[in-house]
């Protein structure tokens, strides 16, 4: 029986030779993950079960949403996680100063790997499909049961084949690809389905591109967003993953419920207008939309490649006087590499705020809340009403290219448009030094 990548991973973890779409199964889990928002209520439910954790080496707890603690309530949330992790000797617990954004550090540290089955109490857990895993978000109760049993139930999803062709232009990155896809199929276009990426265009995408795309699969309603295992994936995991893993490949005659064609060479820089990720338009069709804030970072676009793009555009320039620009590296290691490359200096000289790694403004937590009537261009993954602050504020989702250019011009712009504002010699990403520890990211 021919199977997709998603079906093969689920079948393997259910101990079955084959599964098919719509089938209900119970699977063994490779990793259970929670953060400081979702972890405490899951821990409360777990304690009602009255049994130990299933495996302290297969649990990841990452306090990243409100940490460092912004108030007493967020401090209490972190303490709940800290006490639970110490009591149960959780291997992958990341205390402040050694932490980063969950969906950045788990791939970066090699905790997620090809062929794995992962659940997390966070909707963007689907990020790990970029490394050829099946990963998906779950609710509090399912997470609690996962902590206790190492198992979860699944309805095997149908899969949509996202067939990529063409060459990626230099001003296009993964954010443009996923926003274009969501614009095509809508926020419910892949509801309880897996997005599986195929075609020669996959080779055009860096691991940063893939992690961004898989991260936002949920914004199309998808259960997961899975990439094939290829030479780029192999290179990425080679020096990270220290445990055995088995990649998954779709059968040539695997059945998909639909196919969506995307020619990368035809893509333009796009923005998702308020208040849904499906409200996608090319930047050159927007007209003049003045902005008040720019956020570059988050689990979607806080990686080294993203910061190199921003640094290349901001170097030697100034943020528009009417704009606040906030840069958020996705992890401590990325922050350190950006410092070593002197990109942090570039950002500060341009007039940016540089934050510690945190989810912060993405969910309206802190580090950049919007007031009524304010507009923000953000590289984050959601722009629902009130997502980043006041219900009368607006969030425009964009790539680091568009975000950095907009910070300079004071309106939503492409790097090419920024030239009209007296900006010359724009760089499409500063080349990352070969000596960088993160060079194996395939981000140079």
Image (cartoon, rainbow, N blue to C red):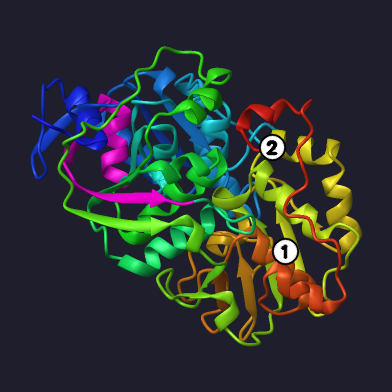
Q: Is residue 359 left or right of residue 120?
A: right
Residue placed most toward the observer, 192 or 208: 208
Say if 263 sits above or below 318 in the image. Answer: above
Residues drawn in magenta: 139-166
Q: Residue at x 57, y 26 (%)?
A: 109
The numbered dot on residue 444 is 2
Quadrant in which the C terminus appears: top right
> Within 10 Å of the Cα at label 2, are there few (<14), some (14-19), or many (20+) other Cα atoms?
some
> Within 10 Å of the Cα at label 1, are there few (<14), some (14-19), or many (20+) other Cα atoms?
many
Corner quadrant of residue 314:
bottom right
Residue placed most toward the observer, 45 or 386: 386
Residue 321 can be seen, yes or no: no
Q: Position of residue 258 (x, y in %)?
A: 20, 55
Q: Is residue 68 left or right of residue 408?
A: left
Q: Position of residue 371 (x, y in %)?
A: 64, 80
Q: Is residue 202 left or right of residue 18?
A: right
Quadrant in which the N terminus appears: top left
Q: Is residue 343 left or right of residue 138?
A: right
Q: Position of residue 413 (x, y in %)?
A: 68, 74
Corner quadrant of residue 227:
top left
The numbered dot on residue 203 is none
Q: Residue at x 69, y 84 (%)?
A: 290
Residue position marked by numbered label 1 in the rendering: 404
**Foreground tag (1 vs 2):** 2
Q: Residue at x 24, y 54 (%)?
A: 259
Residue 299 can be seen, yes or no: yes
Mark 1 and mark 2 lie on one chain; the one further toward the N terminus is: 1
Q: Secondary structure under badge 1?
A: helix
């Amino acid at each position: 029986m021919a199977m997709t990548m998603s079906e093969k991973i689920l079948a393997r973890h259910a101990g079955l030779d084959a599964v098919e779409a719509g089938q209900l199964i119970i699977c063994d889990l490779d990793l259970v993950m929670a953060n400081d928002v979702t972890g405490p209520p899951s821990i409360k439910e777990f304690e009602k079960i009255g049994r130990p954790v299933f495996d302290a080496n297969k649990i990841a707890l990452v306090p990243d949403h409100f940490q460092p603690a912004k108030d007493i309530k967020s401090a209490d949330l972190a303490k709940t996680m800290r006490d639970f992790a110490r009591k149960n000797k959780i291997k992958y617990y990341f205390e402040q100063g050694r932490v980063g954004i969950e969906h950045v550090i788990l791939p970066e540290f090699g905790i997620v790997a090809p062929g794995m089955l992962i659940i997390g109490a966070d909707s963007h857990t689907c990020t790990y499909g970029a490394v050829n895993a099946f990963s998906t978000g779950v609710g509090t109760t399912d997470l609690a049961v996962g902590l206790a049993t190492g198992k979860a139930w699944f309805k095997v999803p149908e899969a949509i084949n996202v067939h990529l062709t063409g060459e990626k232009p230099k001003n296009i990155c993964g954010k443009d690809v996923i926003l274009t896809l969501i614009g095509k199929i809508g926020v419910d276009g892949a509801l309880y389905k897996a997005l599986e990426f195929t075609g020669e265009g996959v080779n055009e995408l860096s691991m940063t591109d893939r992690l961004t795309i898989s991260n936002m699969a949920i914004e199309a309603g998808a259960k997961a967003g899975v990439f094939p295992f290829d030479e780029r994936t192999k290179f990425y995991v080679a020096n990270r993953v220290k445990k055995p893993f088995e990649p998954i490949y779709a059968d040539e005659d695997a059945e998909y419920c639909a196919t969506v064609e995307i020619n990368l060479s035809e893509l333009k820089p796009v923005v998702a207008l308020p208040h849904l990720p499906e409200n996608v338009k090319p930047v050159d069709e927007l007209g003049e939309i003045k902005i008040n804030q720019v956020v570059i970072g988050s689990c979607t676009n806080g990686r080294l490649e993203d910061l190199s793009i921003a640094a290349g555009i901001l170097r030697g320039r100034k943020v528009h006087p009417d704009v606040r620009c906030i840069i958020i590296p996705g992890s401590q290691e990325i922050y350190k590499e950006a410092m070593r490359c002197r990109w942090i200096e570039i950002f500060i000289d341009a007039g940016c705020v540089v934050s510690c790694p945190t989810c912060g403004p993405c969910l309206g937590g802190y580090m950049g809340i919007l007031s009524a009537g304010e507009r923000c261009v953000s590289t984050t993954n959601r722009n629902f009403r009130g997502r980043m602050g006041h219900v009368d504020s607006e969030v425009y989702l964009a790539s680091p290219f568009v975000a950095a250019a907009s910070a300079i011009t004071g309106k939503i712009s492409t790097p090419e448009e920024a030239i009209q504002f007296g900006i010359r010699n724009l760089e499409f990403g500063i080349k990352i030094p070969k000596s960088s520890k993160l060079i194996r990211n395939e981000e140079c």
